[in-house]
Image (cartoon, rainbow, N blue to C red):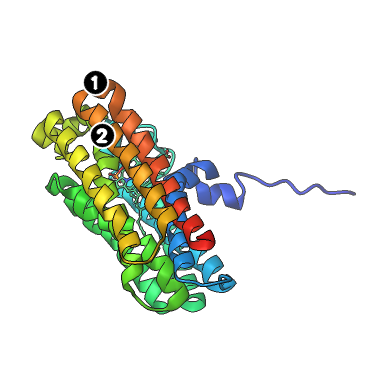
Amino acid sequence: MARTLTLKGPGLVQRLLGRASWQDYYQMTKPNVVMLLLLTALVGMCVATQGWLPWQPVVFGLLGIGLVSGAAAVLNHVVDRKIDEQMARTHHRPLPRGVIEAHRALAFAAMLAVIGSAMLWLLVNPLTAVLTLFGLVGYAGVYTMYLKRATPQNIVIGGLAGAIPPLLGWTAVTGQIDGYPLLLVMIIFTWTPPHFWALAIHRRNDYARVNVPMLPVTHGIEFTKTAVLLYTLLLFVVGLIPFLAGMNGWLYAIGASGLNLAFIYYAVRLKFGDEQVWAMKTFRFSIVHLMLLFIVILVDHFIA
Ligand code: HEM
Ligand SMILES: CC(C)=CCC/C(C)=C/CC/C(C)=C/COP(=O)(O)OP(=O)(O)O
């Protein structure tokens, strides 16, 4: 007599995931942010190389950096789950919605961090593995657990963690720290305050409600608008350094200056215009700006 095998209860994968879908887990890794981080890491790899890129550090370097960055983002969701619940922008995230429990998210983060770090240590080099872990600790530990609730300069200092990927790309390929990738780190470091504060102006009430001392909450909208403008001016200057230092050529100097002038334009419109209109425009532009800026560095490196 033929027997049919019937499975009682949820399958193994579903038992591991709990009530959530794999998309909920994926969303916790902040995939769009990680993609842009990886572009900046790839550019770090390219500027470190003349001619063909070595495939192994590139493939495993990007995978490892991506996995560890994703782990850092998941940890950020765990640490912030209580405030995320009360903010309009974040209340629909998987932890506040209750579809993923904190212990499952922690296990997921640990898995990503262990696989990513092992990949970097064994298939790239230990220096890149250690520096990438600094990034994780800087973002999930120093920024999320401490700075975020401690000072309005939280994102300025914490921005170092998000700025590190070009250096990680460079060390993945060369095995050592150098001055050139630090110029790229400086660019992202200077870009972060106008990127985030533009959004924080728009979301000021969210942050005020949960007592997170973001600059628009502690120092007001006008002061924050001025800070955004000043950082875009600073970014224009910092953006010239790779050209002045001989890392990039004229194509870069023109492309970067054009993009940085456009960022200044948005910041001026935000400063002297209506933040209801210009804050989100400036935030969205900041993302396109950084992506294009790093593409310009790539193009300049390969064809100029
Ligand atoms: C401390 C540093 C940073 C802070 C505080 C910050 C903050 C934020 C916030 C609050 C958002 C909005 C997310 C949402 O809409 O839910 C965002 C979006 C984004 N950020 Fe940042 N950011 C930082 C650094 C970076 C870095 C270094 C990169 C890439 C190199 C980056 C790339 C992006 C991208 C691509 C988005 C859009 C995400 C999406 O649409 O899903 N950010 N950032
Ligand atoms: C290894 C390495 C390079 C790791 C770290 C990189 C990383 C994931 C940076 C992300 C920066 C970011 C989106 C900050 C927002 O956090 P938030 O808590 O202020 O924003 P939220 O309210 O949207 O969660």
Tell me residue 282's x, y (percent). Answer: 32, 33
Tell how many labels. 2
Tell me residue 272's x, y (percent). Answer: 19, 25
Q: Nearer the viewer, residue 247 or 174?
A: 247
Q: Nearer the viewer, residue 262 or 219?
A: 262
Q: Quadrant of residue 157?
A: bottom left
Q: Is residue 54 above or below residue 28?
A: below
Where disc 2 sits, the SS reads: helix
The amino acid at mark 1 is: Asp
Q: Nearer the viewer, residue 176 or 257?
A: 257
Tell me residue 76's x, y (percent). Answer: 32, 49
Residue at 21% x, 38% y: name it: 229
Q: Quadrant of residue 259?
A: top left
Where disc 1 sits, the SS reads: loop
Residue 84 placement, left or right of 10: left
Residue at 57% x, 47% y: name it: 14
Residue 290 placement, left or right of 81: right
Residue at 49% x, 78% y: name it: 122
Q: Nearer the viewer, residue 232 or 90?
A: 232
Residue 30 visible (yes or no): no
Residue 191 placement, left or right of 112: left
- Which residue is label 1 attached to? 274
How far apart in space, not on screen, are marks 2 and 1 (Cα)? Answer: 11 Å
The amino acid at mark 2 is: Ala
**2 and 1 marks in contact (CB < 8 Å):** no
Give whichever of discs 2 and 1 has the lower sequence position: 2
Q: Quadrant of residue 97?
A: top left
Q: Is residue 161 above or below residue 224?
A: below
Tell me residue 270's x, y (percent). Answer: 24, 28
**Residue 267, disc:** 2
